[in-house]
């Protein structure tokens, strides 16, 4: 194991130490399942206090880069980076950015149109029955009049999550995590009262049947219809809000 123990600049010392160890993990100087030095040894080598080391390790654990194990053979070990954990960090940041208006609806729809279209093409070629069954189950739930608005929105996310999984492409699945887990819920929150559920269900079914039939272009066309509909509902929602404010 090779780490740079040069003294760090005072300030956010814990962050600097965490960044130092993180870089060592990402560039391969620290290997998967390798044990880190003890807190006492890290404190001595970095020239900092043990509470500061502890805070740095908490930062790394929150990023799913290290894990502590108890017992005689325990200690703090380097973990294999978990895509869901890493994506969750990105998604939280993206949700915040959307919430404060850093991205407008046109950017979000365009991002979905371009990236999810790739998933549609790959899903048409690579899907398994498991993904088709998952999408069918969500359409059945969405078609049930007893399904609440909250459940409908959650089902919408799961439907598109299954579509992405059907691409059978790990890097793409990772890239799409933010789109599915941040952009779709935010859009749903805005248009939930304006959209017609049956219209969404109809377009979801068209998308599913195109994928089932391995018709990539029909799947992309169904996706584009769905996104055009969501954009229209977003505009209608904003108009309704403006009218209420003016009244």
Image: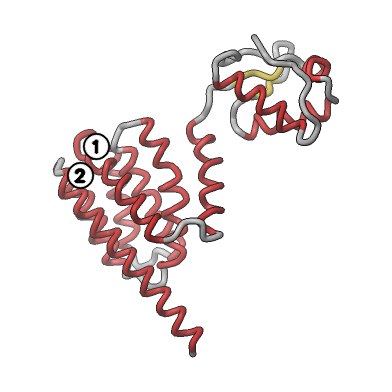
Residue 242, percent from left and from top:
46, 80
Q: Secondary structure at mark 1?
A: helix
Report the residue that reaches farthest toward the bottom.
Answer: 247
The furthest residue to the top: 1
Image quadrant holding the N terminus, namely top right
Q: Position of residue 92 (x, y in %)?
A: 55, 47
Q: Quadrant of residue 100?
A: bottom right
Residue 214 in the image: state x and y as whole percent: 15, 40
Point 55% across, 22% down: residue: 26
Q: In the image, is residue 158 above or below residue 49?
A: below
- Residue assigned mark 1: 122
Q: Quadrant of residue 106?
A: bottom left
Location of residue 19 with respect to 173 vertically, above or below: above
On the rendered structure, is 65 left or right of 72?
left
Residue at 44% from the left image edge and 53% from the top image edge: 183
Give the image location of residue 77, x and y in percent. 64, 18
Disc marking residue 211? 2
Q: Give the image's coloring scheme.
A: secondary structure
Disc 1 packing (10 Å; few <14; some 14–19; many ≥20): many
Q: Which mark is residue 19?
A: none
Q: Is residue 62 left or right of residue 100?
A: right
Give the residue drawn at x 29%, y 40%: 131
- Residue 37's place in the image compared with 178, above or below, is above
Q: Residue at x 28, y 62 (%)?
A: 228
Image depth: mark 2 or mark 1 in front: 1
Mark 2: give few (<14), some (14-19) or many (20+) Cα within 10 Å.
Answer: many
Discs 2, 1 touching: Cβ within 8 Å:
no
| Residue 171 location, quadrant | top left
SS type, badge 2: helix
Observer-nearest of 106 and 229: 106
Q: Residue furthest right?
A: 49
């Amino acid at each position: 194991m090779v780490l740079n123990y040069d003294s760090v600049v005072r300030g956010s010392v814990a962050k600097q130490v965490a960044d130092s160890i993180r870089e060592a993990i990402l560039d391969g100087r620290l290997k998967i399942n390798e044990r880190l030095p003890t807190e006492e040894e890290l404190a001595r080598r970095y020239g900092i206090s043990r509470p500061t080391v502890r805070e740095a390790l908490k930062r790394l654990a929150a990023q799913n880069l290290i894990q502590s194990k108890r017992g005689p053979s325990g200690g703090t070990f380097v973990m294999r980076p978990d895509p869901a954990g890493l994506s969750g960090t990105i998604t939280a940041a993206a949700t915040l950015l959307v919430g404060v208006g850093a991205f407008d609806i046109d950017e979000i729809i365009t991002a979905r149109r371009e990236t999810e279209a790739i998933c549609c093409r790959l899903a048409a070629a690579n899907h398994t029955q498991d993904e088709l069954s998952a999408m069918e189950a969500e359409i059945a739930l969405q078609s049930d009049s007893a399904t609440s608005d909250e459940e409908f929105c959650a089902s919408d996310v799961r439907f598109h999550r299954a579509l992405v999984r059907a691409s059978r492409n790990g890097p793409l699945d990772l890239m799409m995590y933010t789109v599915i887990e941040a952009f779709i819920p935010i859009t749903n929150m805005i248009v939930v009262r304006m959209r017609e559920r049956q219209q969404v269900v109809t377009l979801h079914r068209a998308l599913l049947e195109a994928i089932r039939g391995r018709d990539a272009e029909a799947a992309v066309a169904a996706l584009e219809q769905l996104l055009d509909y969501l954009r229209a509902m977003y505009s209608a929602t904003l108009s309704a809000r403006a009218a209420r404010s003016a009244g």
